[in-house]
Amino acid sequence: MGLEELVTGWANDPDLDGELAHLERIKAHGAIFGDLDPPLPAELADRLAELGIERLYRHQAKAISDIRKGLNTVVVAGTSSGKTLCYTIPIAERILKQPKSTALLLYPTKALAQDQLRSFGNLAIDDLVAATYDGDTEIDQRQWVRKNANVILTNPDMLHLGILPNHAKWSDFFVRLKYVVVDEMHMFRGIFGSHVALILRRLRRLSAHYGANPIVIFTSATIGNPVDLATKLSGLEVSLRDQDDSPSGEKLIALWNPPIEDEEQGRRRSAMAETSDLFVDLVRHDHHTIVFSRSRKATELIYVWSRDRLDPARKDRIAPYRAGYTAESRRDTEAALFSGDLLGITATNALELGIDVGSLDAAIINTFPGTISSFRQQAGRAGRTQRASVAVLVGGEDALDQYFMNHPRELFDRTPESVVVNPSNPLVLQAHVACAAHELPLKPSDAELLGDDTEEAATALVAEGHLELRRGRLMWAHQQPPAPRISIRSSGGPTYTITSDEGLLGTMEETRAFTDAHPDAVYLHQGDTYVVEELDLRRHEIRVRSGKVNYYTQAKSEKLLEVLQTFESRPLGQMTQHFGTIRVESQVVGYQKKKIGSGETISHEWLDLPASVFETQGVWLEIPESLVGDMSTDRLLGTLHAAEHAGIAMLPLFAVCDRWDIGGLSTNWHPDLGGPAIFIYEAYPGGAGISPVAFEIGADHWAATREAIRSCPCKAGCPSCVVSPKCGNFNEPLDKQGAVDFLTSALGSG
């Protein structure tokens, strides 16, 4: 059965419960080729021809021409568009001319670095010696790599921890450094991206110390601000190439919405169950299929549920793929998928990136992956040749999922979100100024690379005794290097270790430890259930015990927000929107035990934990009394609370963030404003760059928020509109209709 016939038949299939909410057809198109002047060296051209690459696409040729001219370049194109050649060819050309030249390539994952290592190996150029250098590299192998490889593939963590602090061992490599590649740059966002931006600046600083000035090359999926992001990551001006001239076969994209099973609460059938049904149907018809899920647990469950329903000939031709497996196991799965031995695979977003997985007929996306960019990347994993393919987005209960199910044109027509970073975050900047001082003594001119706030950060480090002035320069004041103590996945604060009788399970930031790992909290790890026995505040340890329970826990917190500084203000309908810095004081004061399934409250327990206090950036709505004057206090609190929840859920539509990256507070009276207000703030000290975007798109953001609540079919509020999974007040009170009426009055009819 053909793909289109199969997909359109799902709507009438009695074995499938969901609804085909929308079917989008994207027409096939051919390639547009371009030529290089001067042409490629004969040796390289012949080798590419042996690999089946006779001509370059136009966007590849233009990007390579820019790089040849010495321009820092960002290449933006879709999945399987050949972005890798845009940097492998210039690197290979340079090494053919100057064999001692070096290149450093930065990837967001070790798996992607391993995959791209094969791309260099396929070129089979004698003088090009490529190697990975990351946490999986054996200790005795590392010295060989430093001495022999001229193309190093690594990740930000290893660059931060292993290479830059030990730059003296890499001096010969740095002296000859010609290219730095930042692959899949859209993955470097938020706090992680802010750290990466400063790691790249430290890299440029050390390169200059050794007399090198490498060209920086970025590749990215389609995002809303590629030039801005590349500039913030590197501190450099960049040339943009964002026209994709690669060929593509016809693609069908289906939006599949699970049915409502509880109309009162707006509860839908599990997206995982619907995904399993569709996966099984595609595999039974021998269509090579990949399933993407946002968690390891979902990946495993969909695999198990699907395997148990397939016939013996096919059940052994599907496999799961996620982080946590051995590198050998993942490589075996990749090889089986690439060769066509596997009919289906269930995966996390580890396979969303440019890892070559061969030819697939279909991609199923189990709930919206968080950004339009990721959605397009995952959908693009099917149809890597010019054959027809299908992608299916299975909607979840989240407000953003249901918004797209009801407004499909928003998914296909709107510009992708902007990716945000904030290298000026004070805590992040201080961390990397400390690292830079350890690597080389700081001088005033270093502010040109590290940022305008470098002097302020250095002053704070001197006051804390971490830097000291010697011979006119600031030097690291301790014997132990600072880099190992800095997590580039967070903005600061202590990290808690999670241990059980089985050993170390993982780590958790302090801000989440109080809400997710307080005493007696139920903690999930790779599908297994644990109960927290002890939260040691002094040692920063969380002790858990394994055990199955029939309940889950939900923390209750209290918040106080203080406005510290207002940067900008503007009217928003009848309200006033502000952007600035705020102080957040949050304290977990208790928790509820709730039955799994029914959500019935078993008990309410109190806790005595310290408050978490930090400064961050945020946006807030100042609401005039004229808009809410006739409401009772209870209705007003429920109205603003519901609007706040939906506003947080919808913000990722405009900025690349997750609802867990942001927090909120709604109140009928705020002392700094003298009236009602709704706050949305960044959940990281110092901020990750989300708030400026939220301020700029305020009108569109709140209009989309109103529409998401208004179009939800539930009666009193549900997870698809105003109920939040992270509410510290147990989702009480909430007034769905009040939120719709309030936002309509505040924004005007629309």
Image (cartoon, helix red, strand yellow):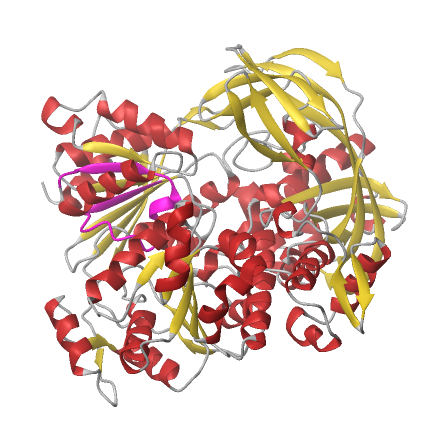
The residue at the point 46 percent across, 55 percent down is 155
Q: Nearer the viewer, residue 280 or 141?
A: 141
Relative horizontal placement of residue 225, taking residue 245 as reference (left or right): right
Q: Inspect this view and state whether residue 594 appears.
A: yes
Above or below residue 452? Residue 155 is above
Q: How many labels sit on residues?
A: 0
Relative horizontal placement of residue 225, taking residue 53 as reference (left or right): right
Q: Nearer the viewer, residue 115 or 296?
A: 115
Question: Is residue 750 inside the magenta stretch?
Answer: no
Q: What is the span of residues highlighted in magenta in the rendered image?
A: 341-365
The residue at the point 16 percent across, 40 percent down is 6
Quadrant into which the N terminus falls: top left
x, y (%) of residue 513? Answer: 66, 30
Relative horizontal placement of residue 579, taking residue 237 as reference (left or right): right
The residue at the point 28 percent across, 74 percent down is 92
Quadrant into which the C terminus falls: bottom right
Quadrant in which residue 150 is drawn: bottom left
x, y (%) of residue 108? Answer: 44, 53
Question: Is residue 355 inside the magenta stretch?
Answer: yes
Quadrant in which residue 735 is drawn: top right
x, y (%) of residue 154? Answer: 42, 56
x, y (%) of residue 487? Answer: 61, 46
Q: Nearer the viewer, residue 579 or 667?
A: 579
Q: Inspect this view and state whether residue 704 appears.
A: no
Quadrant in which residue 635 is drawn: top right
